[in-house]
């Protein structure tokens, strides 16, 4: 099986690529986990996030947004002292703030997944030009980032949001010859789309 080249850094990264990255995600707890790992990743690298994933889960109540939203100063100090944790008070405070904003979106839309997937009509977007020209953000991530920040979310600029859209399958950015990306196209609804233009082809899947 051919994989995207970026995942070949460790066994954990390979497993993440093969089983999670780009798979359409509609579970809110995992949405929150992925989104908050993106927050912790700012200025660092994703391989570190995957290596520290169990630490994050221990610190943030298995990414239960309801529990995290209720965290206070004692929890912040506990997290800062946890062995192996990234010791950034600002990021930890952002995760707690974002949990509260996450709940507000759930109350408005029924789930965070409903909110996010409405931007693409419930289907995965595939941009042909991304197959040969890797991008870090686009018009879609710009729009979602603006709205999330308007709602009070922290550390969710367009680049971070774009990474989340890739991770949760709203955008399929597997390399053109990646067998896992091809399998996702066979298994889930998707739409081929050009940047800043109308969709140019709709798949039957």
Image (cartoon, helix red, strand yellow):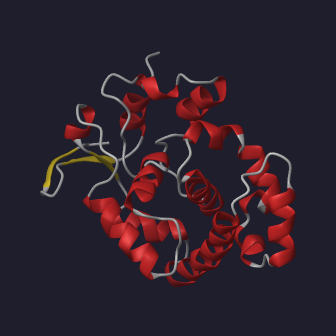
Q: Where does the image place residue 156, in percent across and percent down from the top left?
A: 48, 65
Figure check: 170 above or below 61: above
Is residue 72 placed above or below 119 in the rendered structure?
below
Residue at (28% x, 55% y) in the render: 138
Residue 137 vertical position relative to residue 178 in the rendered view, above or below: below
Residue situated in front as seen by the camera: 91 or 168: 91
Q: In which quarter of the image is residue 175?
A: top left
162 is higher (above) or lower (below) than 96: above
Rendered-image quadrant of the C terminus = top left
Image side of residue 131 versus residue 31, left or right: left
Number of callouts: 0
Percent across and percent down for residue 153 are 52, 74
Does the image show residue 56? yes
> Residue 110 placed where, x, y %?
54, 77
Residue 120 in view, yes or no: no
**Which is nearer the eye, 43 or 163?**
43
Task: Please state if 39 lies on the left or on the right of 77 as rendered.
Answer: left
Between 83 and 62, the one nearer to me in the picture: 83
Residue shown at 87% from the left, 64% from the top: 78
Residue 162 image position (x, y, % from top left) = 39, 54
In the image, taking residue 64 as reference, residue 131 lies left or right, namely left
Q: Residue at x 70, y 66 (%)?
A: 89
142 and 198: which is toward the camera: 142
């Amino acid at each position: 099986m051919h994989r995207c080249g970026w995942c070949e850094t460790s066994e954990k990264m390979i497993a993440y690529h093969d089983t999670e990255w780009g798979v359409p995600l509609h579970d809110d707890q995992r949405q929150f986990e992925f989104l908050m790992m993106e927050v912790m990743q700012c200025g660092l690298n994703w391989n570190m996030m995957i290596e520290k994933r169990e630490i994050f889960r221990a610190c943030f109540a298995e990414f239960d947004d309801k529990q995290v939203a209720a965290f206070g100063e004692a929890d912040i100090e506990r997290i800062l002292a946890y062995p192996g944790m990234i010791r950034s008070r600002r990021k930890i405070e952002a995760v707690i703030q974002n949990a509260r904003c996450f709940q507000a979106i759930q109350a408005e839309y029924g789930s965070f997944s409903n909110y996010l997937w409405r931007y693409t009509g419930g289907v995965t977007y595939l941009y042909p030009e991304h197959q040969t020209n890797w991008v870090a953000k686009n018009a879609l991530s710009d729009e979602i980032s603006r709205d999330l920040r308007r709602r009070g979310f922290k550390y969710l600029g367009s680049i971070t949001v774009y990474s989340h859209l890739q991770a949760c399958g709203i955008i399929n950015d597997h390399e053109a010859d990646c067998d896992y990306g091809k399998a996702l196209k066979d298994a889930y609804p998707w739409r081929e789309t050009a940047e800043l233009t109308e969709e140019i082809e709709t798949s039957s899947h």
